[in-house]
Image: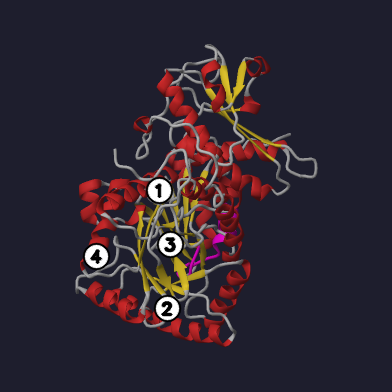
């Protein structure tokens, strides 16, 4: 088995070399760096500068701007100049789609350039010139692969799989290595958290085998807003940070960009101080499946186990709750048959201890159903959401757990039991083990966005949130449309000013609809498809 991290039970950060974006060191033992992206028009200098300053004030260490054409790329010079005038030296990154010419212009004005191998049209061999300019100007390069925009050649060979994402990144990494250019950061993003986590793990294993130690940029694309956006990001990014992977992160929320930074800070800080604690007992690592989904086989005890959907503790009947054996890893040999195990932990690296528990259960041949329990003392709902999702999400991604019990023990909190139940269901949905609500694959917006994403997402949620199991993509433009919402059942995509195109999967079904009619048209499409249900009104 390809090894992707140093240990499943003891925290070690993956060793990487330093990549410099201006004076900001990424990797090489530096803290996990926090970044965001503007959603203003890159040609609007004042709007971009004001938003960048808000991101920096919130704690952002690097800010990305879209440069979809040469005009936008050239204006990065003016944005950099105005920031300098205001005493702000935050490194800027240019986000390039399709046009190498825009990248060649942008590299003259910024500290980092991001290209997507899936749509970077390099027919003229301009990648060589881009690398040359990056080297001369000491500009970093991000090879940013997106699950929904893999090249036709990669799709034909691998499909839209983690293996395809890794192959796409490796092609460009090899080109950089052949040119002795190592100032490269890599990302493999997806709105499907499972795919995202498996892809990063597989990439890390391959890089280890090939002797590459470039830093990793982590993120879940199109995570959405509010509870869903925070949970999906914390599950995906947290699963990787917990194993020592990741050198810079972006939490993508369909909210003001400065709102992303406190969530990223909370997540990075929470998972940063896990080194130096006593080791968890050794486990049989050969039993672990890090690159694809294998659900643990357990025996049914009432409504838990035996392949049944995972349940929240609060959903279990009282009689079922009485038939439990509460333990941490140290009581594993005493587990009686026929009991539901409530798995606790007070280890500083509790996610690893609980993972070790499941591997030891498998080693011992024990098949009791297991409820994963974590207890917190949080007065902030956002802190509870991020920490609980980071602590438990990896376990469900890895096929462990028949139930989930989140407990928040504090007397000075306004967090309700309803908040906790919603959080639990959202974690199960983000990990794809139980679908109980509609899911929204919503991009955070950028300078290409053609309408008010936050307001539109809120309106779409208000009309469709009662539907179960449907995935709706809400995308700002055609660049992030058909590809990046690849996992959605239906899509609402900006097609031009005041115009929306609707998709079923990747197929256009209604084109260039006036925006004030588009939501009604989406509802009508869902009716025609037979997936619409009228909401039940509470009396």
Q: Which range is magenta?
A: 445-460
Instruction: Tell me which numbered mark, 4 or 1, is placed earlier along the sequence.
Output: 4
- In the rendered structure, find residue 196 and report the number of the disc placed on it: 1
The answer to whether one can see residue 444 in this image is: no
Secondary structure found at label 1 = helix
Q: Nearer the viewer, mark 3 or mark 1?
A: 3
Q: Is residue 539 visible?
A: yes
* Residue at the image position 53 percent from the left and 38 percent from the top: 351
Instruction: Kindly identify which residue carries mark 4.
Output: 177
Question: Are the two marked residues, 3 and 1, in contact with CB atoms closer than 8 angstroms?
Answer: no
On-image quarter of the N terminus:
top left
In the image, 282 versus 423, the foreground residue is 282
- Of mark 4 and mark 3, the one earlier in the sequence is 3
Residue 302 percent location from the top left of the image:
56, 15
Q: Secondary structure at mark 3?
A: loop
Label 2: state its secondary structure: loop
Which of pointers 3 and 1 lies earlier in the amino acid sequence?
3
Quarter of the figure with residue 508: bottom left
* CA gap, disc 2 and disc 4: 22 Å
For the residues labelled 3 and 1, the Cα–Cα distance comes to: 20 Å
Q: Of the two numbered discs 1 and 2 on the same chain, state the one appearing first in sequence.
A: 2
Given contact means CB atoms under 8 Å apart, are the residues at marks 4 and 3 in contact? no
Compared with 107, 427 (above or below) is above
**Which residue is tagged 3?**
27
Q: State the mark number for residue 526.
A: none
**Do residues under tags 4 and 1 come within 8 Å of each other at their CB atoms?**
no
Magenta segment: does it hold 338?
no
Residue at (58, 37) in percent of width and height: 347
């Amino acid at each position: 088995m390809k090894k992707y991290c140093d240990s499943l039970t003891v925290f070690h950060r993956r060793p990487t070399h330093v990549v410099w974006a201006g004076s900001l060191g990424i990797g090489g033992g530096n803290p996990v760096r926090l970044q965001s992206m503007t959603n203003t028009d890159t040609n609007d200098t004042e709007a971009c500068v004001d938003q960048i300053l808000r991101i920096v004030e919130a704690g952002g260490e690097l800010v990305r701007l879209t440069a979809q054409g040469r005009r936008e790329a050239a204006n990065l010079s003016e944005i950099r100049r105005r920031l300098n005038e205001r005493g702000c030296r935050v490194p800027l990154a240019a986000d390039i789609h399709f046009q190498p010419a825009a990248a060649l212009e942008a590299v003259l004005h910024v500290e980092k350039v991001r290209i997507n191998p899936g749509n970077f049209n390099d027919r003229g061999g301009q990648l060589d010139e881009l690398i040359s300019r990056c080297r001369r100007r000491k500009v970093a390069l991000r090879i940013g692969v997106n699950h929904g925009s893999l090249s036709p050649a990669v799709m034909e060979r691998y499909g839209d799989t983690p293996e395809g994402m890794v192959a796409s990144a490796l092609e460009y990494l090899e080109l950089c290595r052949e040119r002795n250019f190592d100032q490269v950061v890599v990302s493999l993003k997806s709105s499907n958290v499972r795919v995202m986590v498996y892809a990063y793990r597989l990439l890390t294993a391959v890089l280890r085998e090939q002797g590459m130690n470039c830093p990793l940029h982590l993120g879940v694309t199109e995570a959405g807003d509010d509870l869903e956006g925070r949970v999906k990001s914390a599950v995906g990014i947290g699963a990787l940070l917990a194993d020592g992977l990741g050198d810079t992160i972006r939490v993508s929320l369909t909210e003001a960009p400065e709102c992303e930074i406190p969530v990223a800070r909370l997540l990075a800080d929470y998972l940063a101080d896990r080194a130096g604690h006593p080791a968890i007992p050794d486990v049989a690592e050969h039993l672990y499946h890090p690159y694809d989904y294998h659900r643990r086989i357990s025996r049914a005890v009432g409504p838990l186990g035996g392949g049944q959907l995972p349940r929240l503790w609060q959903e279990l009947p009282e009689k079922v709750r009485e038939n439990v054996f509460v333990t941490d890893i140290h009581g594993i040999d005493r587990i009686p048959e026929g009991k539901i195990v409530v798995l606790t932990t007070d280890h500083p690296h509790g996610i690893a201890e609980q993972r070790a528990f499941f591997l030891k259960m498998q080693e011992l041949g024990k098949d009791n159903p297991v409820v994963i329990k974590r207890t917190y003392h949080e007065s902030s709902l956002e802190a509870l959401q991020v920490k609980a999702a980071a602590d438990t999400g990896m376990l469900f991604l890895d096929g462990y757990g028949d139930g989930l019990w989140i407990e928040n023990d504090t007397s000075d909190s306004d967090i309700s039991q309803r908040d906790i139940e919603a959080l639990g269901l959202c974690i199960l949905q983000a990990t794809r083990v139980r679908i109980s609500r509609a899911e929204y694959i919503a991009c955070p917006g950028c300078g290409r966005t053609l309408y008010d994403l936050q307001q539109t997402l809120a309106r779409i949620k208000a009309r469709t949130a009662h539907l179960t199991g449907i995935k709706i993509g809400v995308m700002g433009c055609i660049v992030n449309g058909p590809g990046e919402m690849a996992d959605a059942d239906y899509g609402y995509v900006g097609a031009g000013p005041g115009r929306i195109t609707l998709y079923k999967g990747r197929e256009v079904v209604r084109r260039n609809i006036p925006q004030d009619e588009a939501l009604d048209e989406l509802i009508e499409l869902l009716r025609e498809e037979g997936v619409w249900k009228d909401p039940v009104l509470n009396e």
